[in-house]
């Protein structure tokens, strides 16, 4: 186990969540130094400011391949548009680094499958930033299901919706987020994907078959869906639904409900209401209070977990195979929406 590791932050001018990664890496324990690659150089000053007094001055590169060759980082954090990410991830794995990438990191599942196999061959972690796993409600739900407290799982109903407002901005229309060729999809692959991941993580079951619809219901000039309705049959036999879309004027709405033969779980990850669960044979409903920092702390906790995994101090917060399973469910839904036929996920 390494006490501290070398980290590289690789990104581009419109890289996703870049400020989150800068803040979290600067504050993470176990980081010895950070090297930065950005073809525009736009983030160099931000990294310097955030790491000043905490870490050595960051090494700056315009070419990520030169950084990988010269710095040989232990962990690469890659924040790129979905179409640009695979080449960067492949180069990082070949350079011997573990990789944490902003999702979805591909525009087709086959590209990520190739990367997952490469990571396995290199004995490296490949992690997508499924930060929702670190939410205390999700962790409690995982604990309840894994312990068998809910018995045989019957069904689940989830939704995660965000604001339609962002889709009305001209700068959004021109961004890679609005292009299926560059982003891979819309709300489902950008936000709803977190809930597909947590469904599989909490239940311990993979999506076996998927069907449903994806559409641009708001009518904005974007080339991706702003709404998806997903119906799933899980590998353990339970069935589930997910509503994923941009519907609101502001903020988010969330729901996670899971029913089993011995009880149920109800959680909302954004409202501040407590998580509730009931176990058959016990009187009343049990609760886990919400903490105001639960949502904002998810990324720092996840990135710290990725650093710890790269140090060899703990298991990875998510595996490449788990990430691939979630991506296959997303692209399976897109195929189902296009063809009208339920898709079997292999």
Image (cartoon, rainbow, N blue to C red):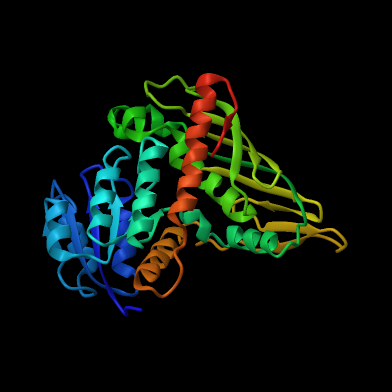
The percent position of residue 305, horizontal first and vertical second, equals: 42, 66
- Image quarter hosting the N terminus: bottom left
Residue 84 seen in the figure: yes
The percent position of residue 160, horizontal first and vertical second, equals: 55, 41
Q: Where, by quadrant of the figure, is residue 229 drawn?
A: top right
From this view, report whether residue 45 is shown above or below residue 340.
below
Q: Where, by quadrant of the figure, is residue 149 drawn?
A: bottom right
Residue sitting at 41 percent across and 63 percent down?
Answer: 300
- Image quarter hosting the C terminus: top right
Which one is in front, 114 or 262? 114
Left or right side of 337 for 273: right
Left or right side of 282 for 156: left
The percent position of residue 206, horizontal first and vertical second, equals: 59, 47
Residue 179 seen in the figure: no
Residue sitting at 31 percent across and 61 percent down?
Answer: 23
Residue sitting at 40 percent across and 68 percent down?
Answer: 309
Left or right side of 133 for 236: right
Residue sitting at 68 percent across and 47 percent down?
Answer: 236
From this view, report whether residue 211 is shown above or below residue 316.
above
């Amino acid at each position: 186990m390494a006490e501290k590791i070398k980290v590289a932050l690789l990104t581009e001018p419109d890289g996703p969540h870049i400020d989150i990664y800068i803040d979290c890496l600067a504050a993470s324990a176990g980081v010895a130094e950070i090297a930065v690659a950005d073809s525009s150089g736009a983030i160099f000053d931000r990294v310097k400011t955030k790491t000043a007094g905490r870490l050595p001055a960051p090494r700056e590169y315009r070419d990520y391949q030169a950084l990988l060759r010269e710095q040989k980082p232990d962990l690469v954090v890659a924040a790129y548009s979905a179409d640009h990410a695979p080449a960067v991830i492949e180069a990082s794995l070949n350079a011997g680094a573990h990789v944490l990438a902003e999702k979805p990191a591909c525009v087709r599942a086959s590209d990520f499958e190739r990367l997952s196999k490469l990571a396995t061959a290199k004995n490296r972690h490949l992690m997508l930033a499924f930060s929702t796993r670190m939410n205390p409600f999700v962790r409690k739900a995982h604990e309840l299901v894994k312990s068998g407290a809910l018995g045989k799982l019957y069904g689940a109903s989830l939704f995660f919706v965000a604001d339609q407002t962002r889709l009305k901005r001209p700068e959004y229309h021109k961004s890679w987020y609005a292009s299926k060729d560059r982003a891979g999809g819309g709300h489902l692959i950008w936000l709803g994907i977190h809930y597909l991941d947590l469904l599989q993580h909490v239940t311990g079951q993979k999506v076996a078959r998927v069907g449903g619809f994806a559409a641009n219901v708001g009518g904005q000039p974007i080339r991706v869906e702003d709404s998806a309705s997903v119906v799933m049959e899980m590998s353990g036999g339970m069935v589930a639904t997910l509503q994923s879309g941009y519907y609101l004027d502001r903020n988010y709405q969330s729901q996670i409900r899971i029913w089993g033969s011995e009880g149920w779980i109800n959680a909302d990850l954004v409202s501040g209401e407590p998580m509730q669960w009931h176990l058959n044979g016990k009187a009343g409903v049990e609760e886990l209070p919400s903490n105001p920092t639960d949502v904002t702390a998810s990324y720092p906790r996840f990135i710290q977990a990725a650093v710890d995994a790269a140090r060899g101090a703990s298991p990875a917060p998510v595996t490449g195979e788990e990430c691939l399973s979630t991506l296959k469910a997303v692209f399976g839904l897109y195929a189902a929406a296009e063809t009208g036929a339920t898709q079997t996920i292999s």
